[in-house]
Image (spheres, grey):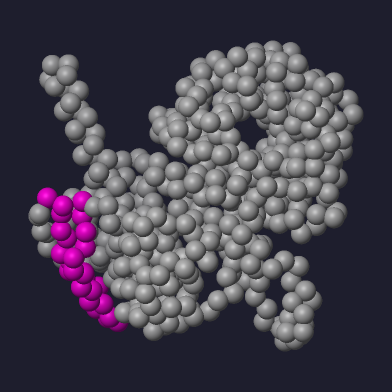
Amino acid sequence: MNAANDNRVVIFDTTLRDGEQAPGCSMTLNEKLRVAAALRDLRVDVIEAGFPAASPGDFDAVREIAQTIEGPSICGLARCNPKDIRRAWDALKDAECPRIHVFVATSEIHREHKLQMAKDEIIRTAVEGVQLARELCDDVEFSPEDASRTELEYLGEVVEAAIRAGATTVNIPDTVGYTVPGEFYELFSYLKQNVTGIDTIRLSVHCHDDLGMAVANSLAAVQAGARQIECTINGIGERAGNCSLEEVVMAIKTRENFFGVETGIDTKRLYPTSRIVSTVTGMHTPRNKAIVGDNAFAHEAGIHQHGMIQNRATYEIMRPEDVGLSRSNLVLGKHSGRHAFRQRVEQLGFQLDDVELNRCFDEFKALADRKKDMYDRDVEAIIMNADSGKAGPWTIDELHITAGTGTVAAAALLLRHTDGREVREAAEGDGPVAAAFRALEQATGIDLELTNFEVHGVTVGDDAQGEVTVTVEYNGQSFRGHALSTDIVESAAIAYLEVMNRISRRENAEALSDTAGTAATGTP
């Protein structure tokens, strides 16, 4: 394959690996599977599912995604050492199209201060890593970490050695978001002109957004010959994040005449996928976020509105429908039937099986009894949050709040357990939410340290749903829960209980595992 003549840009999504490394963005296995399925439906070419050697949880997630998600290549990250690479292959080997992605740092600052390795040692490490990965897997990607701060001639030597060793994709990362578009274009041009074998592999780009130029730098690399872009949904990732998938894809589509390339992304699924990742990670999308933000297609200035009435193209270079954003305002109501609800769900870009649809329809009917007006965002929120607090073992049966100026807030609640127990508890706090949290802790016996509390309005009006995301610490680990309701205190309590349920289920599973292990080995 002569990748240089290919006008198709491969979209490599690393939301589940690099994106998850953002503080507070860790996901459970079920959440990762949900995101992976959404990425498959979005038609990304490669899903980087995780770093299998990083932890048992990462290994399990990569293996589960490799075994269940068909269509895209499933990729696992590994350092250039045998243990990491074999661990990655163990997780990936059942994938329909597996890929091992190996990396080693190459910049002077990394060589001297992180690796304490000479240039020739790093080249040897890279070659050995690629060779071992290639023995296990036909599709091998190599990344020289911090490439944008690596001396050009040396970077060329490393890339050429990796190609000779068998790499099929070579990725050039701007690991710390340091480069600028013109400089990055020159870097890729240098590699294209000076590295033997460069036209036999696919050149890739991976940019971080520390200076706000990840998308611009990625597009500059494409102009210089890169044919794979590594990116994340909503641009999430370490520090300031990664190149935003939806932004770079729509830039290529909208300016196709300029860039002369295309992607295979189903752009109508960009908005639904963005909402799924936002809900799963608890990282709410800013209103002014390009492509998928609430204001991306909003027009308030009078002169803009006048232009839009005459011709949409006056102030819109993309159609909202092209990214899966509905133009609808009020939708359905409490008398709407299941068929109309299913049709609206599909129009919004979501695919639900019968069980999920029935669960969401029941939530919709219950909400419609409480809300005067129902919006598309209400339907989306129901789809995203239908499972919140439902997995048990604890559920809130009653919650009563007393609060007011000059009084101490108090909460009284009734919890039900799946084993039939009922627990009533009351507590006071600095406010109604604090009181509810304290009552939940007393009822379940699980004490949590709240580290972050966010409230996000789903729609408009005094009966709008409030989406609450809580992040807590428990035994040195971070957990996140989210829920929504027209009552903010109720939403907060359900989100807090979701975390408690997750902890309770994990502790019960560990206890059963320990009991089984003791029975099997005969040890006390």
From the viewer's side, name the closer residue of 446 and 364: 364
Image quadrant assignment for residue 353 = bottom left
Q: Which residues are magenta?
A: 393-419
Residue drawn at (21%, 59%) of the image: 395
Residue 120 image-quadrant placement:
top right
- Could one spot residue 160 in this view of the protein? yes
Screen quadrant of the C terminus: top left
Q: Position of residue 252 (x, y in %)?
A: 76, 53
> Which residue is the extreme one toward the right?
193
Quadrant of the image containing the N terminus = top right
Circle count: 0
Extreme residue toward the left, this view? 421
- State yes or no: residue 395 in magenta: yes
Residue 316 in the image: state x and y as whole percent: 74, 71
Describe residue 66's horizontal placement relative to residue 112 as left or right. left
Up-down relation of residue 262 to residue 388 (above or below): above
The percent position of residue 518, horizontal first and vertical second, equals 16, 22
Which residue is depicted at the point 37% across and 74% down? 337
Q: Quadrant of residue 358?
A: bottom left
Identified at 76% across, 33% down, the residue is 203
Q: Residue at the far front: name it.
A: 339
Q: Is residue 396 left or right of residue 2?
A: left
Q: Nearer the viewer, residue 43 or 397?
A: 43
Image x and y of residue 46, in percent: 61, 38
- Please indicate, yes or no, whether residue 178 appears anywhere in the rendered image: no
- Magenta span includes 346: no
Q: Main secondary structure of the magenta part?
A: strand
